[in-house]
């Protein structure tokens, strides 16, 4: 059995839903965020993880909505200590452990040096659904054009890691029953107990749908088609 399962995916792309479903199938997340106005069942993230990731991005003149251009991140000793403490905390819990934070697409090399045996799973969503969802959030409202740009940056990383590491990727836009069947298949591939009932999923989690009235940048459309081709 692998120690860690890392969930890769862009913000507003089903990472919380996928992680919550995998939790139903036996993935141990530890102490994660509670439900909120913008995520009715909680985003399934450890605060210590996303705070460390954001601090690391900030230290490299970036943030979740302005990822660093370079893959080579500068790291303070303090960051490595915080990472190792988080990982040690998981060791008190039952395996396999799960880590989910969209920022991991840009900070994974930093985490890799501290993690033991681990595997990955990814999720993506149509560019217009993500851009619309980001624009609808009053506390962090992102213009549609910037939403498309962020979608491209995150999912370009997702595709690159898929080719480098190889792991199942699911399309969050699938019809509900088909989505759940594929999540169950992913759980089996990850050696989780997919015979139990998945009660985390709620159709209401999909607040935004594909908007055919929005013009998608060509590079986003081409990348989306590539993701569709490799999805499980």
Image (tube, rainbow, N blue to C red):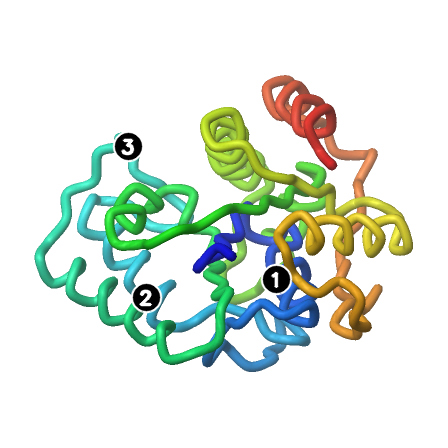
Q: Residue at x 28, y 71 (%)?
A: 88
- Label 3 neighbour load within 10 Å: few <14, some 14-19, many 20+: few
Q: Relative to residue 111, is residue 215 depicted above or below? A: above
Q: Are marks 3 and 1 in contact (CB under 8 Å)?
A: no
Residue beneath disc 1: 19
Gap in Å between the C-alphas at discs 3 and 1?
26 Å
Quarter where residue 197 is shown:
bottom right
Quarter of the rendering occupied by the C terminus: top right
Image position of 80 (left or right of 2): left
Gap in Å between the C-alphas at discs 2 and 3?
19 Å
In the rendering, which numbered label is found on residue 51?
2
Mark 2 or mark 3: name the one nearer the start of the chain: 2
Residue 108 placement (x, y as % from top left): 35, 45
Quarter where residue 92 is shown:
bottom left
Q: Are marks 2 and 3 in contact (CB under 8 Å)?
A: no
Q: Relative to residue 204, is residue 125 depicted above or below? A: above
Q: Nearer the viewer, mark 3 or mark 1?
A: 1
In the rendering, which numbered label is found on residue 179?
none
Mark 2 or mark 1: name the one nearer the start of the chain: 1
In the rendering, which numbered label is found on residue 71?
3
Q: Residue at x 23, y 71 (%)?
A: 85
Mark 3 or mark 1: name the one nearer the start of the chain: 1
Q: Residue at x 55, y 52 (%)?
A: 11
Q: Nearer the viewer, mark 2 or mark 1?
A: 1
């Amino acid at each position: 059995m692998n120690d860690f399962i890392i969930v890769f995916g862009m913000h507003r792309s089903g990472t919380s839903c996928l992680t919550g479903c995998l939790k139903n199938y036996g993935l141990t997340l530890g102490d994660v965020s509670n439900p909120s106005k913008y995520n009715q069942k909680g985003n399934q993230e450890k605060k210590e993880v996303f705070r460390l990731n954001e601090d690391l991005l900030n230290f490299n003149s970036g943030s979740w909505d302005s990822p660093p251009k370079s893959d080579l991140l500068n790291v303070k000793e303090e960051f490595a200590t915080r990472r190792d403490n988080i990982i040690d905390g998981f060791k008190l819990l039952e395996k396999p452990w799960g880590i989910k934070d969209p920022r991991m697409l840009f900070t994974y090399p930093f985490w890799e040096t501290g993690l033991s045996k681990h595997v990955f799973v990814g999720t993506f969503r149509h560019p217009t659904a993500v851009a619309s969802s980001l624009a609808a959030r009053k506390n962090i409202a992102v213009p549609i054009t910037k939403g498309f740009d962020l979608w491209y940056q995150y999912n370009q990383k997702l595709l690159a890691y898929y080719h480098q590491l190889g792991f199942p990727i699911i399309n969050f836009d699938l019809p509900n029953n088909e989505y759940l069947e594929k999540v169950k298949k992913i759980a089996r591939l990850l050696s989780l107990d997919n015979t139990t009932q998945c009660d985390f999923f709620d159709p209401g989690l999909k607040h935004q749908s594909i908007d055919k009235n929005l013009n998608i940048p060509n590079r986003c459309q081409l990348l989306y088609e590539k993701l569709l081709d490799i999805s499980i």
